Image (cartoon, rainbow, N blue to C red):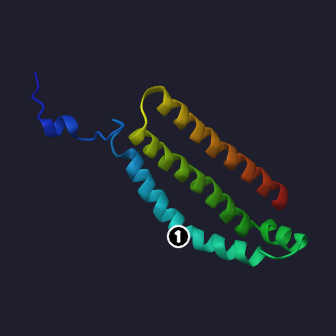
Amino acid sequence: MRYLTDRKRAEGRGAAHAGTEHHWYMQVSAVGLALIIPVFIYIFGSALGGGHAEVVATFGRPFPAIVTALVLVFGMQHFAKGAQMMIEDYFRKSTKKILIMSVIILSYGITAIGLFALAKIAL
């Protein structure tokens, strides 16, 4: 029989009883987004106000298309994880499950629509 102290029982468990995985993912994705968002803003800003042909030409190049896709995918994953953490903290039972599923569906839907639109422009 092993003896568990209070510290050992609590170690690795957060409010959602899943440990620190969400927090660690949020920290890593926040740093990644902080590095890539300025590049995306520069690309988007240079295309902003241009005609249709200029915008298609800008996002038709590989680097702007890849940066935009990365921002879209990782930004929506960051949003989904952050919203999930908030929902887990403030809601209980079936409301929590429904809201988490809704947020995940919303983030995947926005990602899919954005990537489809980007592919239509880039290809």
Identify which residue, 45 or 58, lies in the foreground. 45
Q: Quarter holding the C terminus?
A: bottom right
Secondary structure type for disc 1:
helix
Residue at the spot x=81%, y=61% of the render?
122
Q: Image height check: is 93 above or below 60? A: above
Q: Can residue 120 be spotted in the picture?
A: yes
Q: Quarter holding the N terminus?
A: top left
Q: Would you call the spot at circle 1 few (<14 residues within 10 Å), some (14-19), or many (20 or more)?
A: few
Q: Is residue 30 found left or right of 72 in the rendered image?
A: left
Residue at the spot x=43%, y=36% of the render?
91
Q: Can residue 123 be spotted in the picture?
A: no
Residue 13 placement (x, y as % from top left): 29, 39
Identify which residue, 23 or 62, lies in the foreground. 23
Q: Image height check: is 7 above or below 33? A: above
The disc labelled 1 sits on which kind of residue?
Leu
Residue 110 placement (x, y as % from top left): 68, 48
**Residue at the top extreme of this rendering:** 1
Q: Is residue 5 found left or right of 31 in the rendered image?
A: left
Residue at the spot x=80%, y=72% of the render?
58
Identify which residue, 65 or 50, lies in the foreground. 50
Q: Is residue 46 found left or right of 10 in the rendered image?
A: right
Residue at the spot x=48%, y=26% of the render?
94
Q: Image height check: is 120 above or below 54? A: above
The residue singled out by tag 1 in the image is: 35
Residue 103 placement (x, y as % from top left): 57, 41
Image quadrant where residue 45 sits = bottom right
